[in-house]
């Protein structure tokens, strides 16, 4: 809502997203009406886009032990991702959203033997390479006591987009993610196909299927 001017008699002229209303408005009523319209507009927009949808995941290692929790929620065009983890090897770990909501530790990558092959490649809404995939995230720092936590906001996807036909999963890797940052003095032709796929994050050590939760229901 914007106060766009004053009539000759001193009453306010206000506009609500293109709707122009002239007349005598008590200033308090105008402010209250404006705030109400803004909140209603945001609620309607979130309902229409599914942006109010949020998700969570229980993250487990290959033995089935829970090693973390993830929350995902979109608001104002950005998706907030919150992870808390424990009982992981200290150091930096590649940390991404993967394309399929299947965390099977017996599903082995035929090339590397890594478990959780079932989670598929990095989640991507287009044909990006690493680290431009929609589901690519900053590496997770695990402390000396095995715990780690991080909160990051991304504008690369909306949480509702994670709940596509085959779902999505969060994966923690054994090695740091180099974000395909390979200086020319190491490789004149730049990062190779393998690095552009995963950032050399190594084996998948933990995985969690991201499941839907509606905002306002806990
Ligand atoms: Cu990954």
Image (spheres, helix red, strand yellow):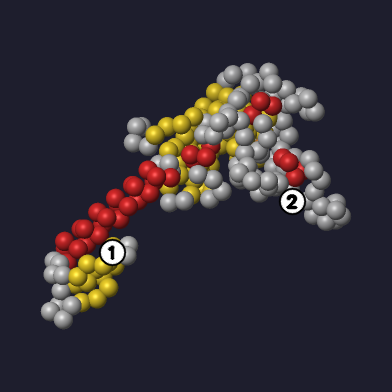
The residue lying toward the viewer, choosing from 217 and 184, is 217
Residue 129 shows up from this direction? yes
Q: Considering only vertical position in the picture, is 142 above or below 17? A: above
Q: Residue at x 58, y 29 (%)?
A: 166
| 66 horizontally vs 16: left or right | right
* Mark 2 crowd level (few <14, some 14–19, many ≥20, 10 Å Cα): some
The spot of residue 136 in percent (x, y) is 62, 44
Residue 143 shows up from this direction? no
Quickly name the residue at label 2. 181
Give yes or no for contact between labels 1 and 2 (Cβ–Cβ under 8 Å).
Answer: no
Q: Considering only vertical position in the picture, is 124 above or below 109? A: below
The residue lying toward the viewer, choosing from 37 and 72, is 37
Q: Residue at x 50, y 44 (%)?
A: 158
Residue 11 location, quadrant: bottom left
User: What is the number of the mark on residue 56?
Assistant: none
Quickly name the residue at label 1. 19
Count of numbered labels shown in the rendering = 2
Q: Is the distance from the Cβ of mark 1 to the nearest ligand 1 atom less than 8 Å? A: no
The quadrant of the rendering that contains the C terminus is: top left
The residue lying toward the viewer, choosing from 185 and 135, is 135
- Tag nearer the camera, 1 or 2: 1
Indicate the secondary structure of the residue bearing disc 1: strand
Q: Considering only vertical position in the picture, is 31 above or below 39? A: below
The spot of residue 3 in percent (x, y) is 26, 70
């Amino acid at each position: 809502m914007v106060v766009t001017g004053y009539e000759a008699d001193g009453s306010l002229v206000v506009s609500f997203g293109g709707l122009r209303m002239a007349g005598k408005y008590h200033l308090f009523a105008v402010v209250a009406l404006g705030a109400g319209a803004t909140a209603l507009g945001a609620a309607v927009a979130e309902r229409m886009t599914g942006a109010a949808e949020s998700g969570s995941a229980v993250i487990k290692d290959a033995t089935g032990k829970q090693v973390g929790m993830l929350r995902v929620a979109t608001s104002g065009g950005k998706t907030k991702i919150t992870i808390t983890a424990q009982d992981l090897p200290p150091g930096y770990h590649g940390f991404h959203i993967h394309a399929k909501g299947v965390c099977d530790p017996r599903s082995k990558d035929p090339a590397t033997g890594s478990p959780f092959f079932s989670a598929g490649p990095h989640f991507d809404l287009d044909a990006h390479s690493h680290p431009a995939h929609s589901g690519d995230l900053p590496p997770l720092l695990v402390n000396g006591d095995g715990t780690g936590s991080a909160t990051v906001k991304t504008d690369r996807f909306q949480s509702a987009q994670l709940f596509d036909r085959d779902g999505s999963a969060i994966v923690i890797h054994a090695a740091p993610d180099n974000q395909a940052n390979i200086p020319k003095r190491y490789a004149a032709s730049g990062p190779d196909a393998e690095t552009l796929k995963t950032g050399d994050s190594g084996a998948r050590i933990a995985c969690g299927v991201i499941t839907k939760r509606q905002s306002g229901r806990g």
